[in-house]
């Protein structure tokens, strides 16, 4: 059994339909899953907001990064009408 919690990453933040060139697929083709997850995007936005604020003890990386992902998880849950 895995010790890691499975997170709902919200799907791709900047999804695209993808395409195959000349009968593809090829390594250079655009895959629909390219890009970052919505969870990573939300966490990055939370991080940017935190860093734009007043400097202080809340900027300890070991605390800040998990807090940003907790906010991202809450935003994904809110999009679905619930709380994780």
Image (cartoon, grey):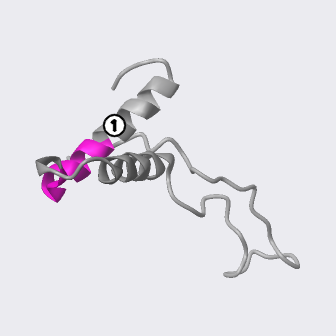
Residue 67: x and y in percent read 24, 43
Residue at (42, 18) in percent of width and height: 82
Q: Which residue sits at x=71%, y=56%?
A: 16
Q: How many labels does the image show?
A: 1
Residue 2 screen position, x and y as percent:
21, 49
Coordinates of residue 78 in the picture (x, y in percent)? 45, 24
Q: Nearer the viewer, residue 3 or 63?
A: 63
Can I make out residue 8 in this image?
yes
Looking at the picture, how far across and down is residue 23, in whole percent?
86, 76
Residue drawn at point x = 29 percent, y = 38 percent: 70
- Indicate yes or no whether the magenta region holds residue 65: yes
Of residues 59 and 7, the one nearer the viewer is 59
From this view, report whether residue 7 is shown above or below residue 31.
Answer: above
Instruction: Spot the residue most to the right.
Output: 22
Query: Magenta stretch: residue 79 in it?
Result: no
Compare residues 18 and 24 and report the one nearer the observer.
18
Q: In this view, does 60 lie to the left or right of 35?
A: left
Q: Which residue lies furthest to the left in this view?
A: 57
Bounds of the magenta segment: 59-69
Q: Is residue 20 left or right of residue 3?
A: right
- The residue furthest front is 54
Residue 35 shown left or right of residue 56 in the figure: right
Judge the density around disc 1: few (<14), some (14-19), many (≥20) Cα neighbours within 10 Å: some
Q: Is mark 1 on a helix, strand or loop?
A: helix
Q: In which quarter of the image is the C terminus?
A: top left
Is residue 4 in sight in this rendering? no
What residue is shown at x 54% (from left), y 45% (from top)? 11
Residue at label 1? 71
């Amino acid at each position: 059994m895995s010790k890691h919690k499975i997170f709902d990453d919200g799907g791709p933040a900047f999804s695209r339909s993808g395409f195959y060139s000349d009968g593809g697929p090829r390594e250079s083709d655009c895959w629909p899953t390219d890009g970052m997850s919505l969870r990573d995007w939300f966490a990055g936005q939370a991080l940017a907001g935190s860093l734009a604020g007043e400097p202080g003890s809340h900027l300890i990386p070991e605390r800040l990064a998990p807090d940003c992902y907790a906010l991202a998880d809450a935003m994904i849950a809110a999009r679905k009408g619930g709380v994780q």
